[in-house]
Image (cartoon, rainbow, N blue to C red):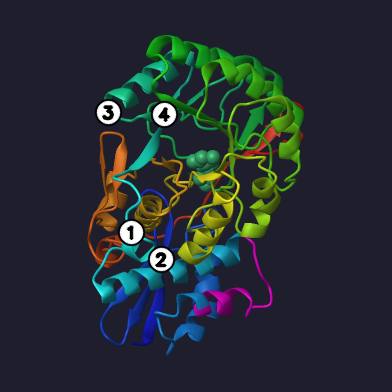
Amino acid sequence: MKIKHAYVNVCSPGRNFVTLKIETDEGIYGLGDATLNGRELAVASYLSDHVIPCLIGRDPFATEDIWQYLYRGAYWRRGPVTMSAIAAVDMALWDIKGKALNTPVYNLLGGKSREGVMVYAHAHGADIEEAVDDVGRHIDMGYLAVRAQSGIPGLDSTYGVPKGHQPYEPAERGLPSESRWSTEKYLRHVPQLFAKVREQFGDDVHLLHDCHHRLTPIEAGRLGKDLEPFHLFWLEDPTPAELQEGFRVIREHTTTPLATGEVLNTIWDVKELIENQWIDYVRTTLVHAGGFTHLKRIADFAALYHVRTGCHGATDLSPVTMAGALHFGMAIHNFGIQEHMPHNEETEAVFPHHYRFEAGYMYPGDAPGLGVDLDEKLAAKYPYERAYLPVNRKLDGTLFDW
Ligand code: GCO
Ligand code: MG
C-alpha cells in the first residue's frame, strides 16, 4: 500500500478545526487532527507546504520511520506547530493501519487494558453557589470525576468560567480579548469553593481543579496545602512548566497530586518532571505531542516513575483527537483519567464518530481504525474564522499568563 494523496481541511463549526486526510492507492484513508487553538493556519501551512509533498509514495504502515523522518529529518524539531503537524500524520497513519487490518486502533496499541475510560467533566459558575450546583448537575449526568472552577469576587472574568450560561469556550472570534488577574483574590477563594463542594457531595466524587499556569511555585505550594483536606484528584498546571524544577518547590510543600503537560510537546519537555516524580499525571496529548508514536513513548517512560496519563481533551481538540485519546486510554496500562468537554452539535455532525459516554466512562467503539469520519460537504458550510485565546494582565496592567 502507498500514500497516494493528502490534503488539509480547515473548518469552523462553532470553533476552528484543522484536519489532515491521507489517502492510499488501495482506497483506504485516514484522518488526523492538527488543530492548534489560535494558530490554526500555521499548522495547516506546515502540512500542506512542507509535509504532504514528502509523504506521497510512502508506505503508510511505516509509522515509526515516517515519524522519525518528519522529526529528525526536518533538522528543526519540537514546538507546538511542528509536533501538531507530525501528530496529524501519525494519527492518520494509525487510522489507516487499523482500517487495513480491520481492527480498532486500541488493538494495535496492546488491546484493552480496562473496560472503559474514566473521564472528567467541567463544572463552573459565576460564584461558588453556581459552581456547586453545576458539580451536582454533572454528578447527576453520571460523571464520576468533575473539575470545578468558579468566578472570583473582584475579577470580571476568569479562566474556566463562561460569561452567561453557554458552555465554556475560551477562544473568541476576532482579535484577542484581555482579562485581569489577581493571585491574592484567587488564592483566598479556591479553598472555599472546594470546602463547599465536599460539604455538599461527600468524598466519593473525584474533584479536579485547573490553575491554568497562574501561580509561582511557592504560591502553588500554599494552594496545594490549603486544598489537602478536600483530597483533590489533581491540581492542574499550578505553575508554567517550562521551568520543570519549579515543580520540586511545589512538591516540597503539598501532598495534593499534580498534573501538567497540555502545552508541552515532547518527551524532553516532561523528562525531569517525570524522572524526579514531581508530577502525578502527565497531560501531553495526541494532537500537540506527536501522535500515538510519541505519546506511547511518553506514557511508557512515565510508567517507570508511577506517573499516569491525564490527556488534555478540551473542545479545541477535535473529535479525531478525542477518538484517538479513547483508544489510547483503553490500551495503555498507566492510564489515569481523560478530560471530556463535549463538542457542540455542529461539530458532532461534521465529525460523525463511534465513541460514546456512559455512566462516567467513555468508550472508543469497535469500528476499524479510529472510528471517526469527516463530513467534508457539511464542513464546507463552516469556513475558517480567525479566533484567539484571551490575553491576561495583572490588575496593574502587567502582562501575565492566561
Ligand atoms: C483544559 C485546558 C483548556 C485550554 C484550552 C486552550 O484543561 O482543558 O486548560 O481549557 O485552556 O485547551 O486552547
Ligand atoms: Mg488545563
Pointer 1 or 4: first along the chain? 1
Amino acid type, label 3: Met
Quadrant in the picture for residue 50: bottom right
Residue 32: assigned label: 2
Amino acid type, label 1: Gly
Residue 212: assigned label: none
Pointer 2 or 1: first along the chain? 2
Q: Residue at x 33, y 30 (%)?
A: 143
Q: Residues within 10 Å of mark 1 (few under 14, many from 20)?
A: some
Q: Give the farthest residue toward the bottom.
A: 57
Say which of 372 and 268 sits in front: 268
Determine which residue is flagged by label 3.
Answer: 141
C-beta proximity under 8 Å, tags 3 and 1: no
Query: Considering the numbered disc 3 on the image, is that residue within a helix, a strand or a loop?
Result: loop
Amino acid type, label 4: Val
The span picked out in magenta is 65-79
